[in-house]
Image: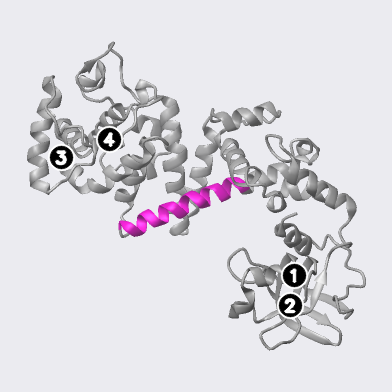
């Protein structure tokens, strides 16, 4: 059993609350259960309880065993001086205040409905793909759908919290922040960190000065990425080397270590060299990209903004000095859709939210509804359970459910898990 189970019982009053008494046989009346606290400090703030003949206003703390109060060091923490009730599964020893007075204790052992406890233990020890795999389809559709809608917003809020940090670093420069975030997502998971480091070391302002020259853009990006530190065997990369040396001296640039970039297990189309060439082409053809996205009316217009072609060298190369079969290096639609999901949608949503402007927020959600469902192992797992997503809005919600709730066994905080527990 986890302590969070006691939190669930207290929040939902899913225990026998008749004739409540402390472990010293004083009657308890719960007038206000308190506000759940997910941060440091007591578990519930601002509770109001009648214990014996006295009404107490204060906090409630919970543990599986009362002795955990001492193990957690609460007796030395002033934040716990205002605890008026200690709720435990089992009181294995009395707990005293710093004044020597005993803290009233409510023991829940024997007050939990057997069926509720059985369902909880099944969820807690289930080894299936998700804890509620055997119960999931018993939950009414309206509860599941409403919860998935909430999870989609929650996922967006997590992403926008990251954007807020980027905006703070750039002093609320939206184009620069968009550029850094877009660069990170160009690297996908494998090369996200070096792509972000590259963007931070090479401000958009510098690239903007050379937007008219694809040669100079590639020189700046590949040079900062560390790919132009040695002489090459072909003319195009050597031309980039010469150009970068001039620009690096002009702007005082120091390149990243080329060893940061990873190729292992990547398809050639996702090689960081190809993505850097595409990124250069995008900067070359898209001045004030975030502003253009704000003006785009639908998904098709956004896809057109990303329909760019790298320099001719990359038509038959995936890496420098290694000619390959001639192949166009256009953005794939699936890759554009990932950029929309992970960069454009959160930026639109956050932009509208910070300006109290609903239209960009609605457009962000509409884009997710227009996008096809994502293809990944998590969505495959849901499909095996008979859950088929119609669009990216639903796949994002399902990813949030699996990674932030099911994998962490946060069933007690999940509307689906709570419904199952209640029977």
Q: Which quarter of the picture shows residue 27?
A: bottom right
Give the mark nearer the N terminus: 4 vs 1. Answer: 1
Q: Secondary structure at mark 2?
A: loop
Q: Is residue 31 magenta?
A: no
Whether label 4 touches label 1, CB < 8 Å: no
Q: Is residue 346 left or right of residue 46?
A: left
Q: Is residue 292 visible?
A: no
CA separation, marks 1 and 3? 67 Å
Q: Residues within 10 Å of mark 3 (few under 14, many from 20)?
A: some
Residues 189 and 307: in front is: 189
Q: Residues within 10 Å of mark 2 (few under 14, many from 20)?
A: many
Q: Residue furthest top?
A: 325
Disc 4 versus disc 2: nearer the observer: 2
The x, y position of residue 326, in whole percent, is: 27, 12
Whether label 2 touches label 1, CB < 8 Å: yes
Q: Which mark is residue 78?
A: none
CA separation, marks 4 and 3? 27 Å
CA separation, marks 2 and 1? 7 Å
* Residue bearing the label numbered 2: 95
* Residue bearing the label numbered 4: 259
Q: Secondary structure at mark 3?
A: loop
Q: Is residue 45 visible?
A: yes
Q: Residues within 10 Å of mark 1 (few under 14, many from 20)?
A: many
Whether label 4 touches label 3, CB < 8 Å: no
Q: What's drawn in magenta, residue-wise?
A: 151-170
The x, y position of residue 404, in whole percent, is: 59, 46
CA separation, marks 4 and 1? 53 Å
At horizontal 27% and vertical 13% (from top left) the residue drawn is 324
* Residue bearing the label numbered 1: 66
* Residue bearing the label numbered 3: 210
């Amino acid at each position: 059993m986890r302590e969070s189970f006691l939190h669930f019982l207290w929040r939902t009053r899913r225990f026998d609350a008749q004739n409540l008494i402390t472990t010293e046989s004083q009657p308890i009346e719960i007038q206000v259960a308190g506000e759940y606290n997910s941060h440091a400090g007591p578990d519930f703030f601002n509770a109001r309880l009648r214990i014996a003949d006295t009404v107490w206003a204060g906090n409630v703390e919970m543990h599986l065993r009362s002795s955990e109060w001492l193990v957690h060091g609460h007796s030395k923490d002033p934040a716990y001086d205002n605890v008026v009730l200690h709720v435990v599964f089992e009181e294995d020893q009395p707990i005293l205040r710093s004044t020597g007075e005993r803290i009233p204790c409510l023991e829940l052992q024997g007050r939990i409905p057997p069926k509720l406890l059985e369902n909880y233990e099944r969820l807690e020890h289930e080894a299936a793909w998700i804890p509620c795999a055997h119960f999931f389809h018993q939950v009414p559709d309206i509860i599941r759908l409403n919860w998935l809608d909430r999870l989609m917003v929650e996922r967006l809020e997590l992403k926008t919290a990251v954007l807020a940090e980027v905006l703070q670093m750039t002093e609320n420069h939206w184009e620069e922040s968009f550029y850094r975030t877009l660069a990170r997502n160009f690297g996908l998971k494998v090369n996200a960190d070096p792509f972000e480091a590259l963007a931070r070391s090479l401000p958009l302002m510098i690239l903007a000065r050379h937007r008219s020259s694809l040669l100079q853009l590639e020189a700046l990006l590949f040079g900062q990425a560390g790919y132009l530190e040695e002489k090459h065997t072909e003319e195009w990369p050597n031309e980039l080397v010469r150009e970068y040396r001039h620009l690096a001296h002009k702007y005082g640039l120091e390149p990243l270590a080329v060893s940061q970039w990873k190729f292992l297990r990547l398809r050639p189309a996702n090689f960081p060299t190809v993505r850097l060439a595409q990124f250069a082409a995008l900067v070359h053809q898209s001045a004030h990209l975030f502003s253009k996205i704000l003006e785009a009316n639908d998904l098709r217009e956004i896809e057109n903004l990303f329909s760019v072609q790298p320099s001719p060298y990359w038509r038959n190369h995936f890496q420098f000095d290694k000619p390959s079969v001639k192949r166009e290096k256009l953005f794939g639609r699936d890759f554009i859709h990932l950029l929309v999901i992970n960069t454009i949608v959160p930026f639109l949503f956050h932009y509208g939210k910070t300006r109290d402007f609903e239209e960009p927020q609605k457009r962000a959600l509409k884009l997710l509804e227009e996008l096809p469902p994502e293809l990944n192992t998590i969505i495959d797992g849901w499909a095996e359970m008979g859950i088929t997503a119609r669009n990216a809005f639903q796949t994002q919600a399902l990813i949030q459910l699996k990674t932030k709730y099911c994998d962490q066994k946060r069933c007690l905080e999940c509307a689906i898990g709570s419904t199952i527990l209640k029977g």
